[in-house]
Image (spheres, grey):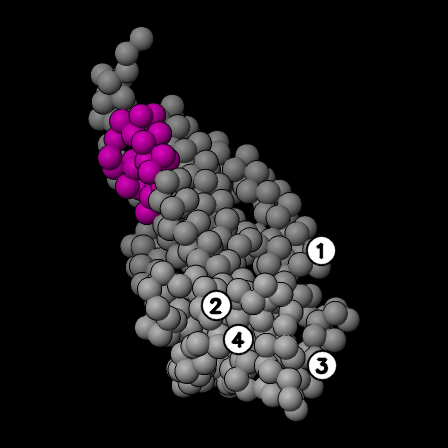
């Protein structure tokens, strides 16, 4: 069966390459749209009672996220005008619905400091608070950008070396998004670099490296673009998906290439690795699919798209990879490998 399959793959290799190129080029723009989202709603099971309660809360109060800004080191009595200026600048932001601070409140003969000590002003009178309500009608996803906009305003309005603190769900979301981006930008390139060095050390061939990387990158593009098309986003859990798929796809390719070096014929190599590689990938895929039993949405998303990505890996490993490897000069690569091996 595998012999017949590889014969058809090699026979229609130009059509397969054309189809792969069209799908890959068409899918690439969707990866750019794949954003980061670590907001509260991401972590809920959409069918759970907690999520329904959460949605009722949003429907009733129209906002879930409150940002508290604490300014330290400025005397309130001598700088009431500065606090009003900060409030006006924050209220002018389209990402902000309303800002409350001490000057907005007054009760009979009591001063604002006495009324709201411990709430809008610390007990030692050293930190003054602003309550910032984000604008939920603003299209900024989950109001993450409001944190950066607030920081820009504070940089312009606060005196130099003035300390301030920001807390609240949007602040946490922004920091989690930054952590996700840092993890993706640092960890995945390191994985790619290490795998490139190992492939070069093992096979001593740039062409083998290009074939491995081409197949693995196509797998990444197809999986992540499908994730974007289905309205999913990256978060602290799913950022592990690209390096995981990269490692799993390379392991199957390296096994096939090593078998190809031993046999010298792509058809014989595919016949030998087809069953063990298929069983390994399929069992691993269904193992990750079991993550769908989790009640945490990002974990379920991770399981579903690792499952899909592994079947894409299986497809490309026995279509695209054999076509590319069929044109590889095995004798030359083996000769270079032997010449560069020292015992």
**Residue occupied by mark 4:** 130
Q: Earlier in the sequence, mark 4 or mark 2?
A: 2
Between disc 1 and disc 4, whose residue precedes? Answer: 4
The x and y percentages for residue 116 are 63, 76
Q: Is residue 330 above or below residue 49?
A: above
| Image spot of residue 154 (x, y percent) | 39, 71
**Disc sitting over residue 56 in the figure:** 3
The CA span between labels 4 and 3 is 27 Å
Asked if labels 4 and 1 touch by Cβ distance under 8 angstroms, the answer is no
Q: Which residue is mark 2?
A: 71
Camera-nearest label, 3 or 2: 2
In the image, which disc is placed on residue 293?
Answer: 1
SS for tag 2?
A: strand
Label 1 or label 2, whichever comes before in sequence order: 2
Q: Which is more N-terminal, label 2 or label 3?
A: 3
**Which mark lies nearer to you, 4 or 3?**
4
Q: CA distance from mark 4 to mark 2?
A: 8 Å
Disc 3 is placed on an element classified as helix
Residue 91 spot, x, y in % from top left:
45, 84
Which badge, 1 or 3, is on the more N-terminal residue? 3
Range covered by the magenta-colored residues? 192-215
User: Is 133 within the magenta?
Assistant: no
The reply, left or right, for residue 291 in relation to residue 84 is right
Q: Which mark is residue 250?
A: none
Q: Nearer the viewer, residue 162 or 242?
A: 162
Labels 4 and 3 touching (C-beta < 8 A): no
């Amino acid at each position: 069966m595998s012999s017949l399959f590889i014969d058809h793959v090699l026979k229609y290799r130009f059509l397969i390459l054309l189809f792969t190129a069209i799908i890959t080029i068409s899918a690439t723009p969707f990866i750019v749209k794949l954003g980061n989202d670590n907001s509260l709603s991401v972590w809920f099971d959409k069918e759970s009672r907690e999520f329904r309660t959460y949605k009722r809360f949003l429907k009733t109060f129209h906002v879930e996220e409150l940002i508290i800004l604490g300014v330290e080191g400025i005397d309130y009595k001598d700088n009431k005008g500065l606090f009003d200026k900060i409030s006006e600048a924050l209220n002018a932001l389209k990402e902000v619905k309303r800002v409350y601070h001490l000057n907005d409140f007054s009760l009979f003969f009591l001063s604002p400091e006495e009324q709201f000590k411990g709430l809008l002003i610390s007990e030692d009178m050293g930190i003054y608070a602003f309550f910032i309500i984000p604008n939920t009608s603003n299209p900024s996803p989950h109001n993450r950008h409001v944190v950066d906009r607030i920081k820009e305003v504070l940089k312009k309005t606060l005196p130099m070396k003035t300390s301030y603190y920001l807390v609240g769900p949007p602040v946490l979301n922004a920091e989690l998004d930054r952590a996700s981006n840092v993890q993706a930008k640092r960890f995945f390139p390191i994985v790619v670099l290490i795998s490139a060095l190992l492939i070069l050390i093992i096979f001593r061939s740039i062409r083998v490296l290009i074939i491995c990387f081409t197949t693995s990158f196509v797998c990444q593009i197809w999986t992540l673009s499908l994730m974007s098309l289905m309205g999913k986003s990256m978060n602290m859990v799913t950022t592990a998906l690209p390096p995981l798929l990269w490692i799993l796809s390379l392991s199957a390719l390296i096994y096939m290439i090593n078998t190809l070096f031993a046999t010298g014929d792509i058809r014989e190599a595919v016949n030998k690795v087809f069953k063990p590689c298929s069983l390994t990938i399929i069992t691993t895929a269904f193992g990750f699919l079991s993550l769908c039993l989790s009640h945490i949405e990002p974990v379920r998303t991770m399981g579903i798209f690792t499952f899909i990505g592994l079947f894409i890996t299986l497809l490309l490993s026995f279509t695209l990879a054999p076509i590319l490897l069929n044109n590889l000069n095995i004798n030359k690569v083996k000769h270079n490998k032997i010449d560069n091996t020292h015992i």
